[in-house]
Structure formats: C-alpha cells, structure tokens
Amino acid sequence: MDLILWRHADAEDGLVDLNRALTDKGRKQAEKMGFWLSQRLPKDARILVSPARRAQQTAAGLGRTYETAKGIAPGATAAHLLSAAGWPETPGSVLLVGHQPSLGRLASLLLCGEERDFTIKKGAILWLTNRVRQGEGQVLLKAALNPDLL
C-alpha cells in the first residue's frame, strides 16, 4: 500500500478553524503540488480530505474527485488517520489531505515506531509505502517534497 500524506497549503488565520481559506500563496502551493501529484498518483487512488475548508481547497489543486472524511479533521489522532486510510491492508494508494500535528505524528509512528511531534511544512507531502521482507513489515519513504522545491 502507498500512503501519501499531504498537509494543507498556507491558510488565513481565523477564529473558526474549519472555515479558514487558503491564502494566495496557499493556492499556488496547492496547484504546484497538485500538478506534481497528478502526474504520479495512480488514477484509482483513493483520496480522503479533511472537511476543513483549507484542506478541501488544497485537494482541489489535484483536480480529481475526492471523499470528505470527518475522521481526518483537525485534532484527529494518528489512529484515526490509520483507520481512515486502512493502513496497511488496503491495496493500492491512499492520499490523505489533512493537518498538523496529526499528519506529522502519523509519519513519526510509521517511520520511527513511536508517535512523536514531527513537522510537515504547509503544502508538503510525504509518500510512504509498506512491504514485507523476510517476514518483517517495513515502511519506506518514497518521497518527501515541499511545494517550494517544485
């Protein structure tokens, strides 16, 4: 299974967290990363997006149909994200468009074996995959990319 973690792009400040929109910078970040992902993400990838406006706008940069998943809203735990994605049993690819610190904690859990604070920059992705070697499950980092590098 491939699991792609995409942190929402740069967003406005605001009192109502779920209503915060992307800034001009954030829209550019979402378009850049969305274009990069669209060239590499399998056509049948499952795309799950937080209900927060900034995450929805980030996912729109991909130009594909996606599902809104309340389980990955701000404040979700790493366990909620794993459950939503179906890691590691789900075949194929799953893209989660979500938030810090949830995505960073999930990345830490999968890569290091324990849930710790790990920062993913706004608009950036981590592309992970799993495999079994000699009976042992492994997680591999396939890509880590910030939109400023595109």
Image (cartoon, rainbow, N blue to C red):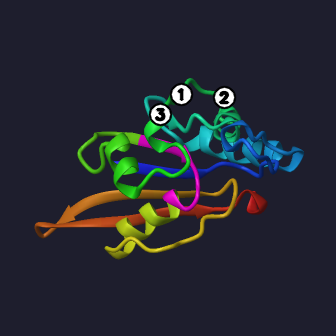
Residue type, numbered disc 2: Gly
Decide if residue 62 is on the left or right side of residue 143.
Answer: right
Circle 1 or circle 3, nearest the eye? 3
Residue 99 is inside the magenta segment: yes
Give SS at disc 2.
loop
Residue at (61% x, 40% y) in the render? 39
Q: Position of residue 8 (x, y in %)?
A: 66, 48
Residue named by callout 1: 66
Give 50 or 126, whichever is nearer the viewer: 50
Residue type, numbered disc 1: Tyr
Measured Cα–Cα span from mark 2 to mark 1: 9 Å
Please state, as top left, top right, bottom left or bottom right, where the C terminus lies in the image: bottom right
Residue 127 is inside the magenta segment: no
**Whether residue 2 is situated above or below residue 105 in the rendered picture:** above
Q: Position of residue 104 (x, y in %)?
A: 51, 64
Measured Cα–Cα span from mark 3 to mark 2: 18 Å
Farthest residue in the top direction?
65
Q: Which mark is residue 69?
A: 3
Measured Cα–Cα span from mark 1 to mark 3: 9 Å
- Residue segment shown in magenta: 94-102
Residue named by callout 2: 63
Rendered image quadrant of residue 132: bottom left
Q: How many marks?
A: 3
